[in-house]
Image (cartoon, rainbow, N blue to C red):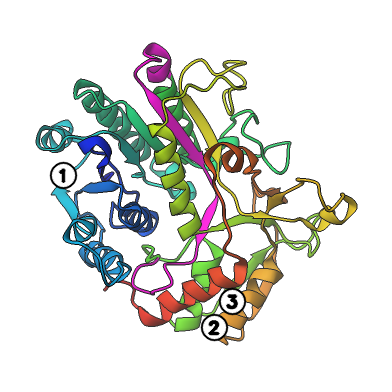
């Protein structure tokens, strides 16, 4: 099971709690979670607490996160500064309510960053009960314990899969939710559960839901990165593992007759450090004593305006699209980083020096030509930014993979 870690906020001697999310099946010591942990430490505003059941997780990751945070301190760092490089780790499982209770009884938790979830789209259709139990039941357990311990701030790490095959590209938050996978439905249901809780006690609860597609890259130190179980489900880590010889060089492309520049699907990628920083933007946003009353992003089919304090936000890579050339240079016409297949291949070839060969095969059922997000709302309201480009994404990914050819093993 995936377990969220708990992050504590040290402002006003309060604490914030932060869960970690597993990649294919990681826990707090997984890909996204480890980078969010690091960003929490680097702010020097949060005391970090995590909870993990150590199922398919990597204990070295948490040690490496602390080491990076310590290395990034200035030479004149105080002992107080050094305290922020420490992570309090609890062994437990959030599908077991008493394990969560144990954390809250021993810590003064101000808020939670909930990242833990099973996340393989294909597998979710094969094991729906496992996904509903882990992703939904665990979330309910967490919210219940939070409520009973007067902890009413949560950042929920959701997914852009809640949109299914949207009709509007790039996707704005107001796009109707129509997930096409069990995984996507667990994320949508969790969002609605959090929203209903906010609606029930709007003066208490504050929540932000983050929706995003494919994180890539790694911390530039090469100490932490993605170590997926089995064959990677995303293209960039797949290419990295091919280059390092971890998996066979057998690359197949599903379709080249889509209405895109190179005929292949366009997908949205974001550097994992930018994504992790976005979680901190959201965390900081919860500290503000403000209530949102804007069009209810992502809940258009249920409510026209936001009633509670939950606000779904899309994270994406901000970059001019090819079509920007028809717009005035001063316009704010931004789209996500358009990562078409051949562009990805060339960027990884440049980073690794590996000569990738690929075979074009038929389209894969359910694939849509363009799946990219519009992060304007996140930029305007939370100060979110994603400055890292594709070359940096690939360079950092290869730095991690080449230094750790077997991952954390």
* Residue occupying the point 40% across, 15% down: 202
Local secondary structure at mark 1: loop
Compared across the picture, whether 247 is left or right of 77 comes to right
The quarter of the rendered structure image containing the C terminus is: bottom left
Residue 10, relative to residue 227: is it above or below? above
Q: Which residues are magenta?
A: 196-225
Compared across the picture, whether 142 is left or right of 232 comes to left
Foreground of the two, 391 or 84 = 84
- Residue tagged by mark 1? 92
Q: Quadrant of residue 67?
A: bottom left
Q: CA distance from mark 1 to mark 2?
A: 39 Å
* Residue occupying the point 40% across, 26% down: 206
Q: Quadrant of residue 178?
A: top right
Q: How many marks?
A: 3
* Residue occupying the point 19% across, 25% down: 149
Foreground of the two, 154 or 166 = 154
Disc on res. 348: 3
């Amino acid at each position: 099971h995936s377990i969220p870690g708990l992050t504590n906020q040290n402002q006003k001697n309060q604490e914030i709690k932060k869960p970690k999310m597993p990649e294919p099946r990681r826990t707090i010591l997984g890909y996204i979670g480890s980078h969010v942990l690091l960003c929490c430490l680097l702010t020097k505003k949060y005391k970090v607490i995590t909870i993990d059941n150590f199922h398919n997780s990597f204990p070295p990751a948490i040690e490496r996160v602390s080491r990076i945070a310590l290395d990034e301190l200035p030479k004149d760092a105080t002992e107080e500064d050094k305290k922020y490089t420490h992570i309090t780790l609890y062994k437990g499982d959030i599908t077991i309510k008493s394990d969560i209770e144990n954390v809250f009884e021993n810590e003064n938790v101000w808020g939670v960053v909930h990242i833990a979830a099973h996340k393989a789209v294909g597998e979710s259709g094969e094991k729906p009960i496992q996904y509903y139990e882990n992703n939904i039941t665990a979330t309910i357990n967490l919210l219940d314990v939070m409520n009973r311990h007067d902890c009413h701030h949560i950042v929920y790490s959701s997914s852009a899969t809640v949109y299914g095959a949207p009709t509007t590209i790039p996707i704005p938050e107001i796009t109707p939710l129509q997930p096409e996978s069990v995984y996507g439905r667990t994320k949508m249901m969790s969002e609605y559960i959090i929203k209903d809780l906010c609606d029930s006690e709007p003066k208490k609860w504050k929540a932000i839901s983050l929706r995003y597609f494919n994180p890539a890259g790694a911390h530039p130190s090469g100490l932490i990165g993605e170590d997926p179980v089995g064959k990677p489900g995303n293209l960039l880590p797949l290419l990295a593992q091919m280059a390092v010889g971890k998996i066979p060089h057998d690359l197949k492309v599903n379709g080249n007759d889509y209405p895109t520049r190179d005929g292949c699907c366009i997908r949205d990628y974001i550097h994992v450090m930018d994504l992790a920083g976005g979680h901190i933007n959201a965390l900081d946003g919860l500290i503000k004593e403000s209530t949102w009353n804007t069009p209810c992003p992502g809940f258009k089919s249920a409510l026209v305006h936001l009633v509670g304090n939950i606000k779904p936000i899309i994270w994406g890579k901000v970059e001019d699209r090819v079509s920007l050339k028809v717009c005035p240079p001063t316009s704010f016409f931004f789209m996500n980083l358009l990562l078409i297949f051949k562009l990805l291949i060339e960027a990884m070839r440049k980073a690794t020096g590996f000569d990738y060969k690929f075979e074009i095969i038929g389209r894969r059922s359910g694939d849509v030509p363009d799946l990219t997000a519009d992060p304007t709302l996140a930029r305007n309201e939370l100060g979110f930014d994603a400055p890292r480009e594709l070359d940096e994404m690939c360079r950092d990914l290869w730095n991690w993979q080449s230094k750790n050819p077997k991952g954390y093993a």
